[in-house]
Image (cartoon, helix red, strand yellow):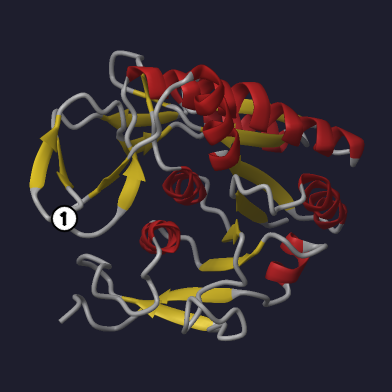
Amino acid sequence: MGLTVVKCGGSDAIDVDQLCADIALVRAQGERVLLVHGGAADIARVAAELGVPARSLRSPSGITSRYTDAAMLDVVTLALVGRAKPRLLAALSRAGVPAVGLTGLDAALLRAVRKPARRSVTEDGRVQLVRDDHSGRIVAVEPLSLQVLLDGGLLPVVSPPASAADGTPLNVDADRAAAAIAGALKADRLVLLTAAPGVLADVQDPDSLLSSFALPADGSLDQVEHAASGGMQRKLVAAREALQGGVPVVRIADGRVSRPLSAALSGAGSEITIAAESRVS
């Protein structure tokens, strides 16, 4: 019996009921499934309701991420744990799937380290140091709780935040969390569902889907063709980390179709691989 780790994006374009009904079908065929989720749309709504400004940071390598000061960390936690996760758990229940919601804080599931300062590129090209960002980089996964749930026939539903060494929460990228979990559990495959058909040769043309896409084994992805959008670039970073962590198959596929997981498992979307060369030239 195989294990598929699925990352569901937080776009409103993805129908949660359709996804969860499809997960039920895949499980009925004997596949174990673990779901990791984000919640960008919910985070934006909660931030607006609470009057917390939303800002992004862009690293020198070109990857954008959410600026998470203390107020935004509260917003992220409230949105993921209070809105996105209950919606998924309710949809899974309606589909007959017994599920348990977790964050990276539970049983120190996701351990992360916070950088004391982050370099961010401003709109005019200047590099500044940001010292009050409560984001982290995942350094370890404690998979015991996940394994116990899976062995018991339950479906874990996981989201950020992660746990720092002293137990305080840190925001982490959900795609990279899914990759780390897939590697720790020795999953058979990682499926990253998004509001796009997959990796596109032309980001303006949804019909330009690349059925396979090879990434460099290391180095920045800012020079990689087709990785122009920040969201897709983060998914490609996560895909590479999963492959290097021992996950044999990684796919980026469309979460908006009626049976998104089944379609991805049947070959829809883009299969991500690592190219033979070791670095972008």
As drawn, 92 above or below 30: above
As drawn, 161 above or below 233: above
As drawn, 133 above or below 129: above
Q: Is residue 155 left or right of residue 200?
A: right
In x, y percent, where is residue 273?
Answer: 43, 75
Residue found 24% across the figure and 29% down from its top: 114
User: Does residue 266 appear in the picture of this structure?
Assistant: yes
Q: Residue beneath label 1, please?
A: 60
Amino acid under label 1?
Pro
Pick the residue in front: 231 or 85: 231
Q: Is residue 44 left or right of residue 172?
A: right
User: Does residue 38 appear in the picture of this structure?
Assistant: no
Residue found 23% across the figure and 82% down from its top: 277
Image quarter for residue 223? bottom left
Q: Is residue 37 left or right of residue 27?
A: left
Pick the residue in front: 186 or 177: 177
In x, y percent, where is residue 32?
Answer: 72, 49
